[in-house]
Image (spheres, rainbow, N blue to C red):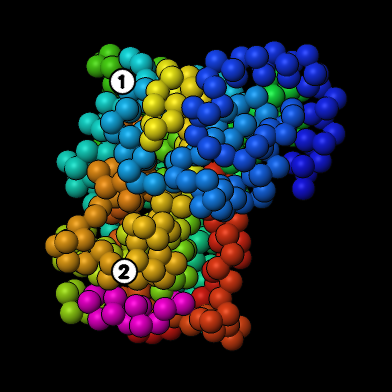
Amino acid sequence: MDFLNCIIGLCFAWITSQAFYRFARRSKAIPRKLLPPGPKPFPLVGNLFELGDKPHLSLTNLSQRYGPIISLQLGRLTTVVISSPTLAKEILRTHDQVFCNRPIRDGIHACKHSEYSMAWIPVSARWRNLRKICNLQLFSPKVLDANQANRRVKVQKLIDNVNESMRAGEAVDIGRAAFTTALNLLSQTIFSVDLADPSSETAREFKETVCSMFEETGKPNLADYFPLLRKLDPQRIRWRLTYHYQKMIEIFDRMIHQRQESRKGDSYITTNDMLDTLLNIRKEKMEDMDMLETQHLFLDLFAAGTDTSSATLEWAMAELLRNPKILSEAQAELQQVIGKGKVVEESDIARLPYLQAIIKETFRVHPTVPLLLPRKAEANIEIGGYVIPKGAQVLINVWAIGRDPITWENPNLFKPERFLGLENQIDVMGKNFELTPFGGGRRICPGLPLAIRMLHLMLGSLINCFDWNLEDGVVPETMNMAEKFGLTLQMAQPLRVVPKKS
């Protein structure tokens, strides 16, 4: 509602008719009939009113009406929305070079994040350098295998905390517990310390900060659609993101400074964590990386590696509790393969196809980033028989693709079995465009290998070590599965469940 009020109160005050006519003349460079179909835009505001408070749903409904490729005029920003795996492949693989860069949202300029974030800077020598560091130094199979013990400890800590709740007869907030585990895993991997203790408020505050970042980044922002409003920041999105970014950067800066001071002493023993790795890279000048890039890389890693993982685990647990038969089959597989009540090891994952199928089905039905981070067309290009104009924003609606009845049988049914069998070997590594929760092409999420390991470890261990009851007499049929839209898709009502001995 605030967004609509801003449109009504500000658009007509600041966007003059002269600016509109200049825009209209420019838009004629591509005749309307060559653009993808879509709803007729209103003067000045275009199709902004079509978005609603859940854009992924609104855009899915529009794609059902106009087709798998549609165009919208959001203020002065031409936006093309893709809702089929075939066309997603065209964007993410076939023409990845044309669509590899992103339109920079106004809020991302907070703390100059747009100049240093690997997620947003253009593909360039700097971007390739950051990507190389992530692929070879941070998330390579060799590095991840060497850090298995850290993940084992953090998952065991999660199980211990749930045991305490069980003995006390208390419900567990699944999203918060998963977030704390993911946060401590990342902070151990990066800094060799735990940033969150479940007995303190640190995890809650950090989660609120990260969730607020994603919510603000995902909000429709007038400054993105009307460049004349950028200096005004009418919805205060950039202002709030500056606060959230600065809060996290201050933590990282303190950690980096403490490590630099400790490394000056002769008695310093290297930890071989990410921070040591990056400081060694700078010291030995193996790669060109300055302190600001380090801070903003950590910002990307913590934001993407905590909120998305915890949200996926929460959705997976919710679907299992809503489908007791699926939960029982998953527990039976775990009991047969590793033994009842044991924590899942990474070496076990390959032998747990049903658990893998549950994770994939969760990605399909509840992608945590329902509209992948936007792409930008660097040239006029024909896709699906229509022209996407240079400068247009391109959105891949993976939420719609995951529920496409042409691709999926009974798409609204949570059915892990659809991923079992040799004929259904679909993975999330960016090769199968029916299921691309991490994106694809050169911009695919670099933390994907770590996220996949952690999700299987946490979900498998939670359902193998405990049975679960819904809180306050809630039954599966009445579970609240409502979504809360931001850059990530959260459960509107946090999932609280009571553990009992399995």
Q: Position of residue 101 (x, y in %)?
A: 42, 24
- The span picked out in magenta is 321-334
Q: Residue at x 64, y 44 (%)?
A: 51
Residue 327 magenta: yes
Give whichever of 113, 389 is nearer the camera.
389
Amino acid type indicated by mark 2: Pro
Give whichever of 316, 5 is nearer the camera.
5
Q: Is residue 307 visible?
A: no
Q: Is residue 296 left or right of residue 135?
A: right
From this view, report whether residue 246 is shown above or below residue 195.
above
From this view, report whether residue 90 is shown above or below residue 159.
above
Give residue 369's mark: none
Give whichever of 345, 231 is nearer the camera.
231
Going from N to C along the chain, the mark reached first, 2 or 1, is 1
Q: Position of residue 485 (x, y in %)?
A: 59, 51
Q: Residue at x 54, y 22 (%)?
A: 31
User: Based on the displayed image, in which of its 4 quarters is residue 429 positioned?
Assistant: top left
Q: Main secondary structure of the magenta part?
A: helix
Give residue 416's mark: 2
From this view, report whether residue 100 is shown above or below residue 455.
above
Q: Residue at x 57, y 59 (%)?
A: 483
Q: Nearer the viewer, mark 2 or mark 1?
A: 2
Quadrant of the image containing the C terminus: bottom left
Residue beneath disc 1 = 129
Amino acid type indicated by mark 1: Asn
Q: Is residue 17 left or right of residue 36?
A: right
